[in-house]
Image: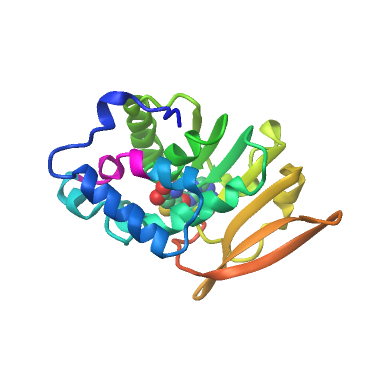
Amino acid sequence: MAIRLNSAHLAGSGMVSARTRARMIDRLREQGISNSEVLAVMEQVPRHLFVDEALQHKAYDDTSLPIGHGQTISQPYIVARMTELALGAGARDKVLEIGTGCGYQATILAQLFKTVYSIERIGALAQASRHRLAELGVHNARLRHADGSKGVPEAAPFDVILFAAAAPISPEHLIAQLAPHGRLIVPVGQHSQELVLICQENGNWVESRLEPVRFVPLLGGVAH
Ligand code: SAH
């Protein structure tokens, strides 16, 4: 697979060896992730470069980690699961992510889709991710500092719209920004959340509730 990353970063740093990353992949397989493209991409993207140096030794553990501003990088399993669901759309032209955070999920998507749009409401995170992705050589992700809850109508239709933050109710208004074969992947709920997939079956948009998840909440407006 052609990885769209600056190759200088692929080897990883000494402390975080290829073996650590391979162990994460073995664990993802045990957790039921079977898509070989998803596994190959996650084996190559240096997840430790998306967190603070002091947390790098935990970057490949099966856990979410703080990224500042009260936000978190999602655990590897959930990134893999959402990416696998995203590939189920079949087409790989445009994906929209709402909640860039540190840019890890956006970087994974950028290896698999032609163009990634990713929106982050916290300016400092958006700015840091812009730098990080440029540094890594990810050139097919368009990052924006904005409230993503209304999507990006001017760039629609998307093959996939993926929320990295939990919506209080299913954001059905975004179906209008999906291609006919498109998929909306979104954690829904407040105290207890479920991962929801919305896609067409026999000409109707159908919502499936997949599994319990835990995400930070989707918030309105922008912050610095
Ligand atoms: N995708 C990240 C996870 C980020 S956590 C990863 O790869 O790990 C979710 C992010 O969603 C947070 O950074 C939060 O600030 C952002 N967010 C919450 N509500 C938002 C909104 N309405 N628009 C854009 N970003 C939002």
Query: Residue 36's x, y, as percent?
Result: 48, 46
Residue projecting furthest to the bottom: 192
From the viewer's perspective, tell me whether residue 94 is left or right of residue 138: right
Say which quadrant the N terminus sits in: top left
When the figure is inspected, residue 150 is found, relative to residue 64, above or below; the finding is above
In the picture provided, is 195 more to the left or to the right than 57?
A: right
Residue 49 shown in magenta: yes
**In the displayed structure, would residue 78 be above or below residue 176?**
below
Q: Nearer the viewer, residue 120 or 102?
A: 102
Q: Tell me: 81 left or right of 56.
A: right
Q: In screen coordinates, is 23 left or right of 197?
A: left
Q: Residue at x 64, y 65 (%)?
A: 169
Is residue 148 visible from the viewing direction of this image? yes
Give the colour scheme shown. Answer: rainbow
Please tell me whether residue 221 is drawn above or below residue 167 in the rendered image: above
**Residue at x-position 33% and y-position 35%:** 128
* Numbered-mark total: 0
* Magenta-tinted stretch: 43-52
- Percent coordinates x, y for residue 41 in the rendering: 42, 40
Query: What residue lies at 72% left-to-right and 37% top-to-bottom?
Result: 157
